[in-house]
Image: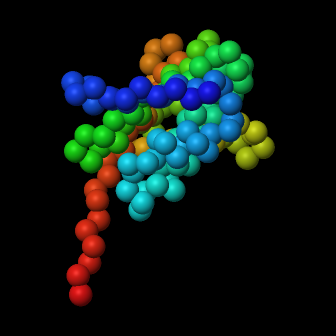
Amino acid sequence: MISISLPTRKRQWETMSFASTLYLCPILDLLLAKIPSEVQAELRLGLQEALVNAAKHGNRLDPSKQVSVKFSVSRGTYSWVISDQGTGFSPNCDCHTGAEDLLPEDFSENGRGLCILHQIFDQVHWNREGTQLKLSKQVKRQRALRH
């Protein structure tokens, strides 16, 4: 089940929550509805990775636990806050290094998601508990070329 709260006049953030699942297509469609088409594929990949991490690693795919997403658009900046009900984690990366330095060893089965997030989004921040991820992306709308 997906629940969405519509924004009030005073609030710029919209909120969505859903039971932990890997079936994310309808959720991603809703989150990307207002995103310019030229960046939708890239942002879909990044948001999918963040949502999979919250549902799979955070909530351990427990359907009784919720993943919550707050999202906002302000002056070309798209922002998301993704929260899970897991025990949290401590990202073992120095966010001041290049994203390619965050890649795991070739034989590793996990860890590429963090690199993907840092490649796609302008800002990637976890709360101290490791249960909330803040992402943002500045998008400049391309103007149609005139001939």
Q: Is residue 104 left or right of residue 93?
A: right
Position of residue 95 measured from the top left corner of the image (x, y, whole percent): 45, 34
- The colour scheme of the drawn protein is rainbow
> Is 71 or 77 nearer to us in this picture?
71
Q: Tell how many labels.
A: 0
Extreme residue toward the bottom, this view: 147
Quadrant placement of the N terminus: top right
Position of residue 120 measured from the top left corner of the image (x, y, whole percent): 46, 48
> Is 125 or 142 nearer to us in this picture?
142
Position of residue 121 measured from the top left corner of the image (x, y, whole percent): 42, 44
Taking the spot 28% from the left edge, 56% from the top edge, the residue there is 140
Position of residue 128 measured from the top left corner of the image (x, y, whole percent): 46, 14
Q: Quadrant location of residue 142?
A: bottom left
From this viewpoint, is residue 40 visible? yes
Taking the spot 25% from the left edge, 40% from the top edge, the residue there is 74
Q: Note whether 39 is above or below 103 in the view shown.
A: below
Quadrant placement of the C terminus: bottom left
From this viewpoint, is residue 99 visible? no
> Is 88 or 91 nearer to us in this picture?
88
Q: Note whether 57 is above or below 49 in the view shown.
A: above
Q: Quadrant location of residue 22?
A: top right
Taking the spot 39% from the left edge, 51% from the top edge, the residue there is 35
Q: Note whether 127 is above or below 34 in the view shown.
A: above
> Is 51 or 87 nearer to us in this picture?
51
Taking the spot 68% from the left edge, 30% from the top edge, the residue there is 21
